[in-house]
Every structure is written in C-alpha cells, then in structure tokens.
Amino acid sequence: MIILSHIFLGSSENWEHLKETVLFDYVFNSLYIMVGVAFLTSIIGFSTAYVTTIFSFTFSNFFHYALILPFAIPTYIVAYIYGGMFDITGTVTTFVLNLLDKNLSEVVFFDIMSIEGAIVVMSLVLYPYVYLISKTYLKAESASIIDASKTLGLTQWQIFYKVIIPISRPAIVAGVILAVMEAVSDFGVMDYYGVATFVTGIFRTWFGMGSIEDAARLASILMIFIFLLIFIEKLQRSNKKYKSSGKDFKPIAKIELKGLKNVLAFLLCFTPFFLGFLLPFTQMSYWFVLSYKEVIDEDFIQILIQTVLIASFSAFLITALAFIFVYNVRLSKNKSSDMLTQIVKLGYSIPGAVIAVGILSFFALLDHYIFNFFNLNILISGSIIALIFGYSVRFLAISLNYYESGFSKIPSSYDDACKTMNISQSKTLRKVILPLIKNSLLASFIIVFIEVIKELPLTMVLRPFNYDTLAILSHEYVNQSQIVQSSVPAMFIVGLGVVSVLILARNMIKD
Amino acid sequence: MLKKITLGTLLLALSLFAASEVNVYSHRHYDTDKELFKMFEEKTGIKVNVVKADASALIKRIQTEGKNSPADVLITVDAGGLFQAKDEGILQAIESEYLNTNIPENLKDKDNQWFALTKRARVVLHKIGSSVPDELTHYEDLADPKFKGKIMVRSSNNIYNQSLLAAVIAHHGEEYALKWAKGVVANMANAPKGNDRYQVTAIANGIGEIAIANTYYVGQMVDNKDVSQAQAVKEVKIIFPTFKNGGTHINVSGAGVAKYSPNKENAIKFIEFLASSDAQEIFAQANFEYPVLKGVKTSEIVKSWGTFEDDTISMNLLGENNKKAVKIFDLANWK
C-alpha cells in the first residue's frame, strides 16, 4: 500500500527522463519475460504433471519426485552455471566450436546471456510451481471424469485437451502466476544477463539516481501489471466454472505406456529434470568437492542451524496465516476479503529489497509509537521479528495460491451439508476440511520453507546484527569471485530443498 | 528491594555492554573484513556488530530508524554511497587528528563526515601480445572509432561504470560525456552484461580486445579455484589509462560516523583502526586493494601490474555527478 501510494505523486524531472528513455524497454522486457515464462512453465509443468499422473512408464515413479527438484536450486547459481557453459565463451560453446572447427560468427548461435536465455533459465527452475499445483489437482480430480469421458467415446488425446486442460485451468494458472511473479521480481539473473526490466530499473533509479520515490513508482506500475493479470484471469474464469462435484475420490488407474510412447514420455520428463537439476547439480557437486574443507567450520554450522530455524518458523507462520485468510474468504463468501487476498498476493511480485524498505518504514513508525507512549526504547526494526514479518509479506502469495487450488476442489456443498447436520464449524474444519487440504498445507509449508532458505535481498536489509543465512554466505562468496566456494552453502540449500521435496512427494504418493 | 537491585545491575550491565560495542552497517562483504574486525575486538575489547547490505538500503535503514538508530559506522564500497549518505544527512562530522593528517584531501569529505579507507582503480585489460597498448593511453580514446567492435564492458547499472562516467563529466562536462558514452557504446563488442570478470574472460577467449574492469577483480581471478577464471587472467595484461587532463580513475571504499551514533567514541576508534597501517596492509594484501595510507605495501600480485598516477579529482564529484551519469547512460543507450 505504501508502495502503491507513490503512483499518485506528481510528475518529477527524473520521471520525465525515465519516460523519455528507458521506460518502454522496462515495460516491453518485463512483459516479454512474463509471457515467455508463463508459456514455458505451463507447458513443461503441466505436461509432466499430466504424464506422471495418468501413465506409468520407465522411471515414472522416480520422476514423480525428481521433477520438483529444480525448485531447490537457487536461480542465480543456475544462471551463473549456464552462463559459464553456453555463453559466447562458455565451455560447451568453445568445445562445440572446436569440434566443428568454426568461429562464433560462422554458426547460428543462441547466446544464453540474453532475454530469451533468461526466460529459459527462469522457466527451468520455476516450472515446478505449475507441476506441483497441477499434480495435486489432477490426483484429486476424480478418475471418474476420465472414465466418463471414455464412455463418451473420447480418445486419450481428446480427453487431454477437451476435458483435462479446461478443468485443470485454475491449478495451472495458480502455478503460472507464482512463476511469473518470481521471474519479474528477479534482479540477480536479469542484471547478470544484461536484461533491463522493471526491477533492474527500480534499483538503478533508487541506487543510481538516489530517488526512492521514482523507484517506488516503477514498483507500483509493476504491481498494477500483475494485478491486471490476475484480474483478467479471474474474470475469464468466472465465465467458465468447473466445480468439482466431489464424488468418487477414487485413485486413477495408471495406463502403462510401451514402445515409442514410453520413450517419448521418458524424454518429456527427463529433459526438464536434466536441464533444471542434474546438469547444474553436477557442476555444483564438483565445486563442492573442491572446496568444502575450506568453507565448513564452526561459523558455518551455526549459520546452517540459524537458517533452518528461521525458515521452519516462518514457513509454519505463513502457512497458518494463509489458511486463516483463505478459510475466511470461503466462509464469508465476501468479495472484499477476496480482494484483500488478491492484493496480499501482489507482495510476491515486488523485489525483496523494495518490500524491505516498506517494512522498515512500518516498524520505524511502530518503534516511534512505542517509544512515545510507553517510553520504551525497543527496536523492532532490525530485529528477527521484522525479518519474519518481511518473509510473510513476500511469501504469503505462495501459500495462498496452494490453498486456493486446494480449496477449489472441495465443493461448498460439503460445508452446507455439515451445517444441515448441525455439525459445528470447528468440527467441520477438523473432520472435513483439514483432511482434504492436508496436502496443500504440507505443500505450502515446504515450498515456503525452501523459498525462505533461498531468499536474499530482503534478508540482507532487514536482518539483525551478526546474522547470516546460507543464501547470504553463498552470495558473499560469489561477490568475491569465489564461485567454487559459494557452491558449498548453495549445496546445503539444495540439500535441505531435496529432503523437503522428498517428504512432500512421499506424502503425495501415499494418498 | 531485591527487585531494585536486580534491575539496577541489569541496567548497569546493559550500559556497560553498550559502552563496549560498535555497530557497523557495511556494504563491504569480504573475508578480510571479518579478520580485521576480530583484530579490532582483540586490540580494544570493543565488540563489533555487523549488518551487511547494499549502501542505499543501509542508508534508508538508518534514515527510517531515525534517532533510535543503533548504527555507529556506515561503510560503503564507492564514493557515490558516501556522498549519498552525507546528502541524506545521516552522517556527522568527526574530529580525528589521525584521520585528518593521514588521509589525503581528495579522499575525504571536506566537512570530515567520511574518510576513504581503500582505493581501487578502474582500468583497461587486453590480451597479451595485442596492439591495444600502443593505441590506448587515455580514457577518452575508448570512444575512438578505431576500437569499433572491440570493447567489453558491463551494464551501466553498475556503480563503477557510473563513477567512471561521473569522472568524465567532472573532467570534460556533460556534453562531452554524452558523446563519449555514445562512442563507447558504438565500440562495444557485445551487449553489456555479466560482471567485470566476465569481460576479462571474454577477451581472453577472443571476444573483443579491450575489457574495462576494476583492479581487485583481476586480483581475485589469480589462483582462483574456478579454472576458467584462473586460466583467463593469465592471458591478459592491465594498462592504466589516464584522463587527458588527469590521472587514472580511482574509486574508494570508505566510512563515516552515523548522525545519531550511540557509541561515537568507539566509532571513531574503529575508523581510525581501519586506517592504521596494520589494517591497511591487510586490505592491500588480502583483497588486492590499494591502501590510502602512504608507505603501506601492496600485495605482490598488485605490484606486478605496475604503478600509476591517481586522478586527483575530489571523490565528492563522483557522488555529485552520479545521477547525471545515470541519465547520460540512458540517453546514450548504454544498457
């Protein structure tokens, strides 16, 4: 809200300059990234979710877990590794050129360090958002829809695009919106790949021109973009409602694939797993082995423990908060609380450092108030409370999106039925609602946990004295040209991510 | 009664604790700093508390914390940040005989609100054996059409590029600066991207012939565990260009005392320590920076690059011109 208010400020000299020179680039590039990432993540995420849910093929059970893993790798590491392999001087590029005995100018070359490259790299690590939400959704969507479609004489392919895609739309959209918001709020990858977006512009205007007002104005335009995106989608969706009847939660009988189809399904899943996880992971492992002895010491262990503690606590808090939000909207069926939920979600599209500034101002006011009225000189800004609050603002969107798709599967007739049977609201919650959205709860907890562990800009600005996290440590090594050493904290980030993902996937299989 | 005593001791303990610490907001993120802070703690018994983030964010944090701010010292990695801090009114003038006599005039604020601690030069690198050194002696030459398609340089989002252009403005004015920036853009071998190390690796691999980079990045690449960096840096050489009417462009990392510093004395002691010859030597040895204190030895690697004359324009001008520089970059379409 503080950020939004800046739009209505009058014009300034800086603003005129931005409009005349770079604003068009910011708008165009950010839109391009949004469209590109939406396109790629929905295709990769949904196709793999569909294939692993409906069919069984070589390694399909393995992919069930493995396809989530790219999510555990910090984006900047993937971007850096891909740059090192595929850019103009990359190891792979040089190797292939030598093999062909050609110069760079003589071949058709796709430079990964470009806006298209950034879209590909971001999509490779962000598609798991779509995959996870779609998968939870597809599994719960009763197999009866498929059965019914079959009795109507539809082929497997027709079922896919005439039935499955339309009914899965809320899930795909929920995942895509998260992926898009994360992509447009990224600074590290875009700056390194030389792409000027709203976010690089925000920092350039703030740091370079010393104008936080104009930076905030850029941030507000970005928020409006995202808001429009969500709004248009909602509007469209409300025309076509596919509400689950809630009958027949029977498991899907998986169809076994053979021959060419088996190979294709395998490749479809192997490619994103390989590019999004295996390839960068292999490079990181090599670096890890080179430098773990030098990096791991007592301080490191303490940072590790600190990171796990704050991430678990924040994930727990955010998951609980989001539940209250969504459940409240469901019960009250109130348009304004739904609107509030949508606005809260926008927090995810704002770069962490900008949110951090808003939070600083908020707590500074609060501290001032406490000081004046209670004569207590307590500083909340710069405390762990401010930091956790910051995570909540930023990551509530993720949690909310998981619930919304989870809740949309539970028909409201359930609540009504409980009401007519005189079952109390809390009992309905405990006995009916919670068991049904257990997976969404767990998914939210784990995704937020991983996100907090990976978070960098917000943590840097809001943290208390002498407080480091794994992500910060990794970032500091990168800044000192020690990319090899930076892989050690990054490896622990990935490790924690992998363990959490495995827990998540196991629970989803058991269901 | 008992309560009063406990409260009293508690308050005393708190005030004692407060008397023996210094709270540092730093944009520097090097292992060397950790080492130096430990040295300071051992020497003085004053505990150093650190929070590290980008200077602009730290300045904003000090600003919003206002009179309650626990910040004692702000450290930045460029003159622009120090200028901005002073401009926002979050620093205070300090009296220090040691800093006044030992830090050169152009490397400190005229009102004694901040002092430089280390210097870094922004230089040009070329592949060993290339003809570049014969043709390039001034920063002004970088805009010469003879270097068309040869220059590798990072994006203008970067503060070090902004400072370089701010120096061009200081020497020749805005009009020339725009012409110069346009000339450099026309000479670029590739769209600006990556960091300084990326530019050095590129020219080592035959993409472009001239890389613009800060000296300490080059130092960090030597003996790097990342083989591609260590290999690339062996194939390049540094030249120290000068301005036609000045010396080699330098930028500084420096510190100032926060306006509402609760531990002002410790803060001054802390900055004096960082400017002492012991500390200066560590900056120079471990992080390949140039000391601000005369008579302190640089590292062997740094020495091997040769010597140069500093450009002596005031660091204040870099900060003052920074905003103009960013706008000129936009106009010149330097991405």
Image (spheres, coloured by chain):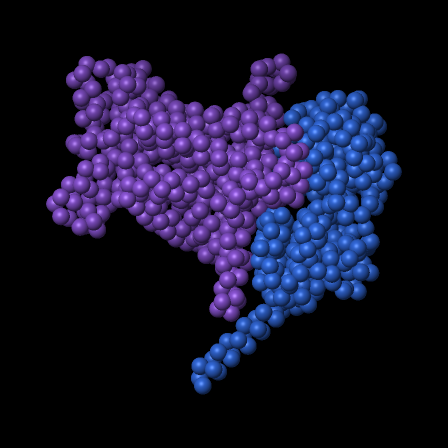
Chain colours: A purple, B blue
Left/right of residue A173 with respect to residue B70 in the rendered view: left
Front residue of A48/A380: it is A380
Q: Is residue B22 left or right of residue A173?
A: right
**Residue B313, image x, y percentages:** 82, 45
Res. A108 image quadrant: top right
Task: Name the residue at 57% across, 23% down.
Answer: A111
Q: Residue lying furthest right in this view?
A: B245
Q: Residue at x 71, y 28 (%)?
A: B332
Q: Nearer the viewer, residue B78 or A405?
A: A405
Q: Position of residue A257 (x, y in %)?
A: 26, 20
Relative image position of residue A95 (x, y in whole percent): 57, 22
Camera sees residue B150:
no
Q: Nearer the viewer, residue B78 or A412?
A: A412
Q: Is residue B179 above or below residue A489?
A: above
The count of marks equals 0
The answer, for residue A345, to whether it is visible in the render is yes
Residue at the farthest bottom position: B1
Task: Give the residue at x 49% y 48%.
Answer: A470
Residue B22 position in % (x across, y down): 62, 64
The C terminus of chain A: image quadrant: top left
Left or right: where B45 falls relative to B114: left
State left or right for residue A167 relative to residue B290.
Answer: left
Displayed quadrant of residue A146? top left
Write down the quadrant of residue B178 in the picture. Answer: top right
Front-lying residue, B279 or A252? A252
Q: Residue at x 84, y 32 (%)?
A: B137
